[in-house]
Amino acid sequence: MGETKNIRLNRLPAITWYWLNMNEASVDADLEGPVQAQAEAPKGVSFREEKADLFPDQPTGAGKAFNKAAEAAADSVQVWTAAEGVKATDPLRLKYQYKDGDKALNLVNIVAEKDSDMTVVMDYSSAPEASGAAAVQTKFSVGENAVLRLVQIVRVGQKFSFINDLGGRTGSHARVEVIHMVLSGDKVYQGYQIDLAGEKSSLKTDIAYQVSGDGHLDMNYFANHTGRKTECEINVNGVLRDKASKILRATIDLKRGAVGAVGNEKEDVLLMDDGVRNQTIPLILCTEEDVVGNHGATIGRLDESLMFYLESRGLNKEEIYEMMAKARIDATLRMIPDEKTKEEINAYLGGGTEDDRD
Amino acid sequence: MAKEKTYVEDIDRSMYDFRNEEKDEFRIEEGLTPKIILEISKEKNDPEWMRDFRLKSLDIYNKTQFPDWGPSIEGLDMDNIVTYVRPNSKRMAKDWDDVPDEIKDTFERLGIPQAERKSLAGVGAQYDSELVYHNVKDEVAAQGVIYTDIESALRGPYADMIREHFMKLVPPTDHKFAALHGAVWSGGSFVYVPKGVHVDIPLQSYFRLNAKGAGQFEHTLIIVDDDAYLHFIEGCSAPKYNVANLHAGCVELYVGKNSTLRYSTIENWSKNMYNLNTKRARVEEGGKVEWISGSFGSHVSYLYPMSILAGRGARAEFTGVTFAGKGQNLDTGCKMVHSAPDTSSYVSTRSISKDGGISTFRSSVVVNRQAKNSKSSVSCQSLMLDAQSRSDTIPAMDIRTQQADIGHEAKIGRISDDAVFYLMSRGLSEEDARALIVSGFADNVGKELPLEYAVEMNNLIRLEMKGSIG
């Protein structure tokens, strides 16, 4: 990009009252070339570099303005492909390690061809004291009967801002599993638009975050059901501390023609301190009769009866909150289908999981 | 074999859809100019401050953008809307016999005087821009309850109270149609319930817009003093025309300490109506506001009653049902603002969309930092009756204190085939089975209304359901 531009991103698919300040985010971005990702590729997954995005028309969570800016700034796209029928037994690991002063933008395309099966782990980190900004935009196409498990972990320093943007499309009977973890960062923007276009394709998303200090997390997830009998499930678990703030926009759009589609989303937010701010706006949009859409959210303190039980077991209030906060992150951490990544993240979080106590 | 839709002719809404010949005494020219505003002000015999307030509101209106986040209001051309129509009636009557026959007949067909005799403590009836009838039972008046038209109150002993409260909860800067209301408002009711008074039976205002291409801009101001109780019912309807009509009323409710105000609305505007209404309540310590809302009519609705929980322990409940049929885009919901400790809000809504109708549930729950130990629960359920319709839920939550318990759930789905099959196996026709299920779905509102109104609401649902079987 070369110069600082104000970009509006993470816009709701259906906006609401402006006074709530929840319709979209805005970021001053000055992003340049890519950083070199450290890659560990399994057998069967190939790499090539392209001049341009393979999926220029695929919308993402950040939206059109960011897409346009990213397209203008990037001169190459890293493309990872699991060819037809390839079942990769090990994950593709991509590590992005940012330095102080970085202003990096990476574009990644993932192609899971028909009947393939692949796991991709993208780990974004920086030195704790590093300041700067970076963005990674990932787009994918998952073919008929293919499976993509995509794990994206944001753990940049508390002075580092990050945009993790995702968009993709499913073929018939395809399955996509997304795990998003945000463990640190100054201002973090992330989200996706996933088009469930193929009949009986499905999407499962597990998101865990902890935001502390005066950090801000801005999320925009959009499951777009156009195919018949498509399914999506979005589970969000988060912890806010100190003076942190967070907004979750989560949309399930059950479009006309998506007969038999089912969408479920659930958010659970634990507020640890009195200076935090939580904003949640879960949308269900529906133009098809034969569908089911559900949303549930709980925000605030721990349940009184749970507190009473744990206090009667000798724990004090602070210990209980810390324990429950860790449990929320651990619950998603355990879902990561890669032991090596799990261990690294566990070490980063500074402790063992409950499983380690056995 | 693919299931075929049973097509039933559109139903007869003659109960609401009858027109009287327009014999208005005075009708202001179409459009919005300072000259028109001054003419309305002169016609209303406004005090000077109100005239200035109108002009300032017009200025705000001209500087404010139309909303772009809700249903389209492109079909509403303010240059074609008549903002003031005085019916051919003596100024407000206290005796039903003094109301002109044609207008009297209108309200009799709508069942208003019968309801007054049977179940109401007082009635106000507005026809186009003016209240034509207002009455309160002697025993209620003897308790010190004031129920009158707002223009009389502006010049009477309560003038200072009106000035202190008028458009203070909904300032003209709130949004474009609040500004419009501030500029052209006419008619509406003023209610004051003194400290400690419990009004056992409800008061009701009914708004009827007969004039083609006109707007109705009534203002309702209710002040319930401490330790008091009131149930206020609002009804509205209009005949259908082939040009746009506009309703941009404003309701301001002040609920005193430990008082309760229940505000019930069955809205059944005609399907050429743009219903851009604003309702807001401020609730003091230990007080409670209960909104019961049924939205059935209008072409386009923007309706989101707001409750400001200003005192410790204040509570708000919103129970609503919205039924959007052919040609309707009803954007309804509520706003809850928790601004004091120990406050609680409870929202339960049902939306039904059929025959291409669009229903949107839109809400916000804001819990401010000082609102420690606040609780909020929001539940919205939507029913899609066919694949031509649309149903959206857009609930927002903004929580700024750790010491809060917030819960939200939303569900969108269709009528269960199993439930229809079960009812049909018990001898009901498919049409009746579906109507019964939909009535049950909307029962959250019905059970909160006085019996007569619950029956009216169920009839409306039954009416709307006819022709929707598929």
Image: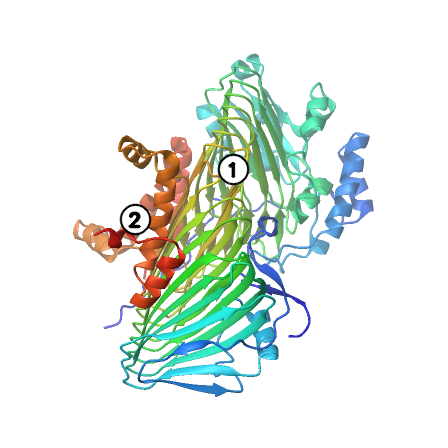
Foreground mark, 2 or 1, reads 2
Q: Quadrant of residue B299?
A: bottom right
Between residue B153 and residue A39, name the one nearer to us. Answer: A39
Image location (x, y in percent) of residue B416: 26, 55
Please report the residue visible at 79 percent of the width from the left and 41 percent of the height from the top.
Answer: B55
Output the chain of dot 2: B
Label ID, residue B437: 2
Q: Residues within 10 Å of mark 2 (few under 14, many from 20)?
A: some
Q: Can residue A167 be seen in this view?
A: yes
Output the chain of dot 1: B
Image location (x, y in percent) of residue A134: 55, 68
Q: Is residue B363 visible?
A: no
Q: How crowded is mark 1: few (under 14 residues within 10 Å), some or many (20 or more)?
A: many
Q: Quadrant of the N terminus of chain B?
A: bottom left
Between residue B447 and residue B151, name the one nearer to us. Answer: B447
Question: What's the distance in space between the residues labelled 2 and 1, CA to CA?
Answer: 25 Å
Q: Is mark 1 on a helix, strand or loop?
A: strand
Q: Quadrant of the C terminus of chain B?
A: bottom left
Image location (x, y in percent) of residue B127: 62, 38
Instruction: Name the amino acid, label 2.
Output: Ile
Label ID, residue B235: 1
Q: Quadrant of residue B182?
A: top right
Residue B285 located left or right of residue A173: right
Callout 2 and callout 1 share a chain: yes
